[in-house]
Amino acid sequence: MTSFGDTKLRNLGDYFATGSVADRPALSSTMAALRHFLARAPASFARHFAAGQPITCKAAVARGVNDIRVEEVTVAPPGPREVRLKVHSNALCHTDIYTLSGQDPEGLFPSILGHEAGTVVESVGEGVTGLKPGDKVIPCYTPQCGEPDCIFCFPPRGKRTNLCPKIRGTQGSGVMPDGTSRFTDAEGKEIKHFMGCSTFSEYTVVADISCAKVSDTAPLDVCSLLGCGVSTGLGAAWNTLNVEGGSSVAVFGLGAVGLSVIQGAKMRGAARIFAIDMNPKKFEMAKDLGATDCVNPKDYDKPIQQVIVGMTKWGVDYTFDCTGNVEVMRAALECAHRGWGESCVIGVAGAGKEISTRPFQLVTGRKWTGTAFGGFKGRSEVPPLIDDYEAGRLKLDHYITHRFQGVEGNLKAIEALHSGDCLRAVVTY
Ligand code: NAD
Ligand code: AHE
Ligand code: ZN
Ligand code: ZN
């Protein structure tokens, strides 16, 4: 820890390398004095603060099932085609809690969770182009290599996907593409990465192909929403099922993901939108976003799919599971319209869970599909969402229901998401 006046800073280099002072106006004059001082300091001293050095900072480390602790960690400099990011804001996604709870078959401990963030580039590794210190970035767990021979970035015959597999193997193993981790704990032991993001840390290192560079004026707290859940819901409606005007939609689960499906469907002009949740506290926001019918399965003594079909003639054009519950996934499929209804699995189910239905449901024309990150290609299709927000075309502020400060705030965010009245708890470091 370095002290300067009454301001304690663990790492000063980032304040010179990035624009983060702009986000902390009170520090500006102190930083100006420091810049002046460092400009005249001996080279060896200045190098200590420069890019290329390890950074010691705070992170919430998942040590085991439901065991998460704030610790000091060391973040190595970025390797080739890697970027070190100063995390400004983190929004908690249900998937972080799912992995912490031990249900994720890919879950690893110890690891640094978190994958919805607004960040600033602190430094870049060799071979990185198009990104520089100070750039604002949304790390995306679905990367986009953009290499001409990647058939997922450039699919054949008019196909469309965002599932670039370039680093998926190492990402799932909790390491960078070279097979090693950039995080170590106070004893020098390795800590794993998570979903290629690990944003429960003041600093993180990600692959350059995971970085969506957004406008210099983008608010970093709002950026955090677009790192996963809200983009996923919007994209499920727009990209995956391509909801059209006049259609009917049913959304199961009204967290940030489900509500953003509703918002996306309404923006497309859906005529009837069913919002289904066991928690009636979610209905008010659902109605504000465009739901026409709010349904609580607890109010009925028959399966919810029968209830929804009964409220229509032949079912609903587009249905979405946003719960991760495999019975709900079945219900969503079975209330899709005879002949053409499409059902999208968004929720993530625990290890060992499987979905089932009578094949007759598919024989009679329903289609079952799913989405990762709403089908958005990270680097090219996420920045326009922030442009839309800044231009007032896309409303996002309503998803931030809770705010906390400091890495410790991630623990409070976990409690908040469990409370049932939280959509996104944004933690600012
Ligand atoms: P959340 O916990 O905030 O919301 C889930 C909602 O589902 C809650 O409102 C809850 O009351 C409701 N619910 C639970 N059981 C239900 C039931 N039986 N019937 C009706 N409603 C029920 O979670 P979230 O952050 O909105 O995420 C939703 C799901 O989407 C999670 O499973 C998450 O892991 C997953 N997810 C997937 C992707 C993807 O790319 N596929 C991206 C983000 C999140
Ligand atoms: N690790 C789990 C799979 C988890 C999963 O399906 N993740 C979603 C994103 S959840 C975001 O909040 C996803 O997009 N998966 C695609 C991918 O490549 O990970 C398991 O079952 O192994
Ligand atoms: Zn690719
Ligand atoms: Zn997520």
Image (tube, rainbow, N blue to C red):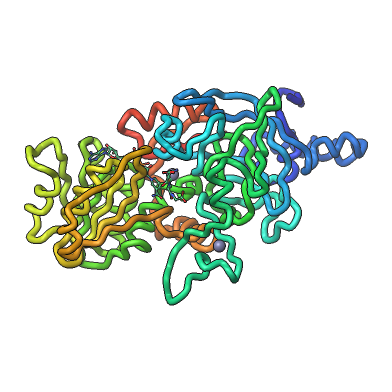
Which quadrant holds residue 24? top right
Q: Quadrant of ligand 3?
A: bottom right
Q: Nearer the viewer, residue 285 or 178?
A: 178
Indicate left or right for 428 with 355 as reference: right
Location of the N terminus by quadrant is top right
Identified at 56% across, 44% down, the residue is: 197
Identified at 59% across, 61% down, the residue is: 145
Residue 133 is situated, as x and y percent measured from the top left of the image, at 70, 50
Residue 329 is situated, as x and y percent measured from the top left of the image, at 25, 47
Location of the C terminus by quadrant is top right
Which quadrant holds residue 176? top right
Identified at 54% across, 51% down, the residue is: 168
Residue 152 is situated, as x and y percent measured from the top left of the image, at 50, 65
Q: Nearer the viewer, residue 189 or 260?
A: 189
Residue 159 is situated, as x and y percent measured from the top left of the image, at 42, 71
Q: Residue furthest bottom?
A: 157
Q: Is residue 214 in sight in this rendering?
A: no
Indicate left or right for 312 with 26 as reference: left
Identified at 34% across, 45% down, the residue is: 347
Q: Nearer the viewer, residue 174 or 413?
A: 174
Q: Is residue 188 in sight in this rendering?
A: yes
Q: How many marks?
A: 0
